[in-house]
Image (cartoon, rainbow, N blue to C red):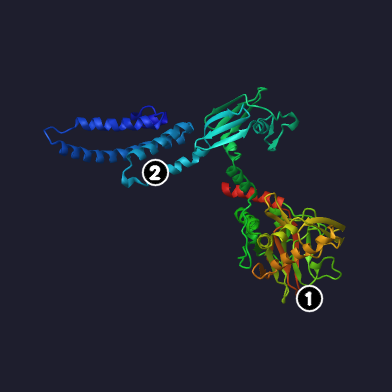
Amino acid sequence: AAAVAAFPLLGPAPRAAGPVLPAICCRTRRRRGRSRPGGRRSGVQYSEELALVKRHSCSEDFVVVIKMWNAVAKILLRTKVHQDYSRTLLLVQKGRSILTRPPSSRNCWQHTAQAVQPFNMSTSIQKVEALDVNNFVRIHWEDGSKSLYPAVWLRDNCQCPDCFLHSAKARKLLLEDLDVNIVVKEVTLTDRQKVYITWPDKHTSEFEAEWLKKRCFSEQARAEMQEELFLPECKYWGSDLQLPNMSFEEVLHSDESAYKWLSTLKKVGIVLLTGAATRQGELVKLGKRIGFLRLTFYGPTWQVEDKMDANNVAYTSGKLSFHTDYPVLQHPPGIQFLHCIKQAANGGESEVVDGFHVSNKLKEQNPQAFQILSSTLVDFTDVGVDYCDFTMQSKQRIIDVDYKGQVVRINYNNATRDTVFDIPAEKVQPFYAALKEFVDLLNSPEHKFTYKMKPGDIVTFDNWRLLHGRRSYQSGTETSRHLEGAYADWDVVMSRLRLLRKIVQNGN
């Protein structure tokens, strides 16, 4: 109604793009025919003049049509007229441009293309149908793609209040109440955006097009969803690492900076935060920023310094070889924070190496060694008193791989590797040979990166991926080097990362 009021000569809006444009062109031709000049002229001369008039008039009409339909579309969008109605008008613009676009109008439709994008045409549904004796529902999308959904999955994921608790985003439907052989009784489509399914017991389910599109079972769609959920992208590096660094205060107070920190930590495996105060307690702030820290037998935070009767080799001034922390736990901490409060004048440089990158190198150079380290369970132990007394024991593979054979965690700490070794005697020497080759690769100059922390620096790194070490330093009567450490779990970090991504993307 608003469109007709604004342009009364238009009459009712067209139902489709096709019939309208020929009508406009025909009216133009009839009008020009009545104004044909009198007198007898040659056919060639008349044709040339008519062609010239047509080109000039067509260009004028073209500009008028563009302005007209752009204005109509904007009014309809402002008044929230049904999407399909507005989409038809915008498609008329596009159709007109294809039929009569003059050479000089190549960029006229850039703004129109941007206007179409919010409709997200790829999530509009063209048709739905039940297949294979109603065991599947197939959706035909407007972009030409198709998706197949098993009936049992659709019933299991019904989004109605009886089957799904939306306040908790959790399923209420009990599996014992699910018929795994269920079929679809009826499937219908409404507004190209909603699929309605009626089941044999007369229960009904409603699914949004966007929800279904994101959960498509095609290989590409599943890969995209996994990437969105788990952010698996990994940037490998060696001695050429450009150590990412950010402001500690900005990470604490800016969601965008915190998102950049955690996403870089996930991708590269290490980020240096600068500008923290040189006192204990700064890591607690970092823990609150992500959620909370991981409590271990060494406390919520722990002090790394040269101690008498040290209960950990880290609490000495000697060299620390490459290792991951806490493989003695069944679930080692995923993230480690080290805050430099005081640094030694001589020595104490930190060393890190990308364990995933080196593991892949080992797999290329010696597949058998990789197979041994990724299949042999190694015993780890740790006994002592700190936050409380403890006696810990675990079995870990040096290189953990997932179902695809990709490296997902390194579990290696030579200091806590147990004297107990639960494998047959004839497999011991091949294991040592494989481990030695791996350690030699870790220590290769092309793979390790060395840096020295300054007071106020906080290094944050992936304890499942990176192995870290320290060069020896000179210790005196007073404390010459003091770091505070803490752990966090990847579950906590990934949760905060997903929340921050949503905030940053929404611009809130």
Q: Residue at x 70, y 57 (%)?
A: 286
Classify 10 Å Cα crowding around label 2: few (below 14), some (14-19), many (20 and above). some
Q: Is residue 431 left or right of residue 506?
A: right
- In the rendered image, the quadrant that contains the N terminus is top left
Q: Residue at x 69, y 31 (%)?
A: 163
Classify 10 Å Cα crowding around label 1: few (below 14), some (14-19), many (20 and above). some
Which quarter of the picture shows residue 8? top left
Question: Is residue 462 among what the camera can see?
Answer: no
Disc number placed over residue 475 in the picture, else none: 1
Q: Is residue 112 left or right of residue 279?
A: left
Circle nearer the N terminus (2, 1): 2
The kind of residue tagged 1 is Ser
Which quarter of the picture shows residue 429? bottom right
Classify 283 as above or below 17: below
The kind of residue tagged 2 is Trp
Which quarter of the picture shows residue 325? bottom right
Q: Which residue is mark 2?
A: 109
Asked if the residue at tag 1 contacts the one at tag 2, i.e. Cβ–Cβ closer than 8 Å, the answer is: no
Name the spot of residue 62 as percent of width and height, x first: 32, 39
Name the spot of residue 130 as percent of width and height, x first: 58, 28
Classify 235 as above or below 65: below
Measured Cα–Cα span from mark 2 to mark 1: 72 Å
